[in-house]
Image: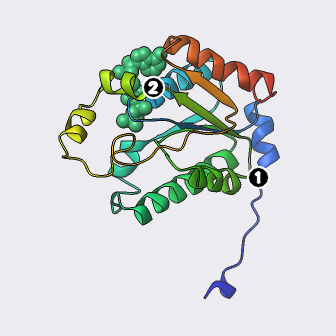
Amino acid sequence: MKENIVWHNTSVSHDDRVQLNGHRPALLWYTGLSGSGKSTIANAVDRKLFEKGCHTYLLDGDNVRHGLNKDLGFDDDSRVENIRRITEVAKLFTDAGLIVGTAFISPFIADREQAREIAGTHFVEVFVDTPLEVCEQRDPKGLYKKARAGDIPHFTGISSPYEAPENPEVHLKTDEMSVEEAADQVVSYLVQKGIIG
Ligand SMILES: Nc1ncnc2c1ncn2[C@@H]1O[C@H](COP(=O)(O)OP(=O)(O)OP(=O)(O)O)[C@@H](O)[C@H]1O
Ligand SMILES: [Mg+2]
């Protein structure tokens, strides 16, 4: 009964919240292979922003699947729905004025473009660009080993494609820089765009 659902305007506006926070909202969308460093860098950035007094929140892959998306599997439809829900949640947080980080492999261009469209705020695609060989060598969760053994179907980079961003706002080559340098590059982008002071 969609026709009976009416949007209720809020008494505290988005602009009120931005003013109180002292910075603009943004959605930092980290994308890259498993083990590329999304969670590590997103957490380093989050810590830096937090220490600057910014209001932030981080949505991370496995954590979201423990709760909000625990009913979803890994087939194509579920992956699309996974990203859609995450984007809608991120949108609520950015509407509340936060700088939100999302750390999901999000291998498909179409899904990331949909996120960009839904977000409707400053969308920052952060390409955590780490060669497959390096990710496989790091293998922090032991997933590549399992995927090579054929124990994980549709594993990105091994048996499922990763579509690299063509024009990311931030491009991090993590095999050439430290976590600290990568995080600084993201923060610099936010300063340069006037999102934070
Ligand atoms: N320059 C670097 N930047 C980021 N991570 C690095 C770097 N050098 C080494 N690492 C290590 O690489 C690993 C990256 O793992 P991390 O869990 O952050 O990847 P992820 O992209 O979140 O993977 P997943 O998609 O499986 O969650 C960590 O163990 C981290 O310490
Ligand atoms: Mg991660």
Q: Residue at x 35, y 57 (%)?
A: 74
Type of amino acid at the residue the image marks with label 2: Pro
Give 46 or 120, whichever is nearer the viewer: 120
**Cβ at disc 1 under 8 Å from ligand 2:** no
Q: Quadrant of the C terminus?
A: top right
Q: Residues within 10 Å of mark 2 (few under 14, many from 20)?
A: some
Asked if the residue under mark 1 is in contact with the one under mark 2, i.e. CB atoms within 8 Å, the reply is: no
* Residue 71 sits above or below residue 182 on the image: below
Camera-side mark, 2 or 1? 2
Give how far across and how far down residue 35 sits, in percent: 38, 29
Residue under label 1: 12
Amino acid type, residue under disc 1 in the picture:
Val
Residue at (61%, 39%) from the top-left corner? 165
**Position of 48 compared to 23: left or right?**
left
In the rendered image, residue 159, in percent from the top left (x then y), is placed at 33, 47
Q: Quadrant of the N terminus?
A: bottom right
What is the distance, in whole Å, between disc 2 and disc 1 at their CAs? Answer: 46 Å
Label 1: how many residues lie within 10 Å, few (<14), some (14-19) or many (20+)? few
Position in image of residue 28 (x %, y %) = 62, 36
Whether the residue under disc 2 has CB within 8 Å of ligand 1: no
Callout 1 secondary element: loop
Residue indicated by mark 2: 131
Instruction: Give the number of the disc on residue 66.
Output: none
Residue for point 32% across, 27% down: 136
